[in-house]
Amino acid sequence: MGPGPWRRLSCGIGVSSALVHRAAARRLVLRLKYGGCRESAEVLAAVMSPLLPAGASALAPVPRIYSRRLKYRSDPGLLLAGALSRRSGLPVCAVLGPRLQGGANAGLGRSDRIRPRFRRRWTPPKGLVLVDDVLTTGATLTAAAATLGLSPVLGAVTATASSHG
C-alpha cells in the first residue's frame, strides 16, 4: 500500500488521497463499499486524518446513490466521515443529498461514466472538506463542490485514488 497522489481538480479544489487504489487498499475500500465494514473505515481514516487541511471546520461526506445505499446497506463516504470525525474532532456536515437512482461508475471508462448529481440540503459552513472513498476522474468531487458552491469548500480527502486519474 503506497501513499496516494495529491491532485488539483479542474474546479480548483485540491484532493489528498491516502493510498493508491490497489492491493490491500483496494480490498479495504471494497469491504467498505459492498460490505459496510466499519473496521475498514477506521483503518482508512487512520491514514486519511493526517491529510485533513489546516483550517478545516467540518467534514462533508459525498453521498452514495440512495438505491445503492439501500442495496449494500452502506454509504462509504458517510462511514469514512464518521471515522474521520472521531479522530479529528471535526463535525460531520451531511450537506449533500444523493440522487435516488443510477448505475455504478466503477469499472467504466471516462466516456461511459454517469454524470454525478447532488442536491444541497442547506448552506454549508466555510472550511468544508469533502470526504469520499475513491478518486478516479474527479467528476464526483467536482460535481459535489459545484453543488455546494466552491467558496465554502476548502478541499477534499479520499481513502484511495486510481493511479491513472
Image (spheres, rainbow, N blue to C red):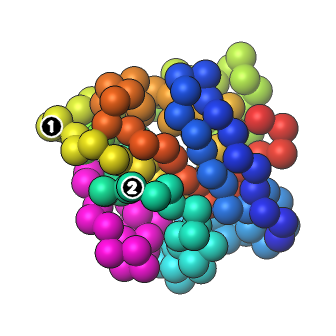
In the image, residue 3 above or below residue 146 = below
Q: Residue at x 53, y 23 (%)?
A: 11
Q: Residue at x 43, y 47 (%)?
A: 130
Q: Residue at x 75, y 56 (%)?
A: 4
6 falls in the magenta region: no
* x 36%, y 71%: residue: 85
Q: Considering the numbered disc 2 on the image, is that residue within a helix, a strand or a loop?
A: loop
Q: Does residue 89 sit above or below 2 in this rendering? A: below
Give the residue at mark 1: 122
Q: Is residue 136 visible?
A: yes
Q: Which residues are magenta?
A: 70-94
Q: Position of residue 58 (x, y in %)?
A: 31, 57
Q: Nearer the viewer, residue 51 or 157?
A: 51
Quadrant location of residue 153?
top left
Residue 117's x, y, as percent? 40, 26
Q: Is residue 95 left or right of residue 77?
A: left
Q: Is residue 21 visible?
A: no
Say which amino acid is labelled 2. Gly
Above or below, 80 against 99 in this view is below
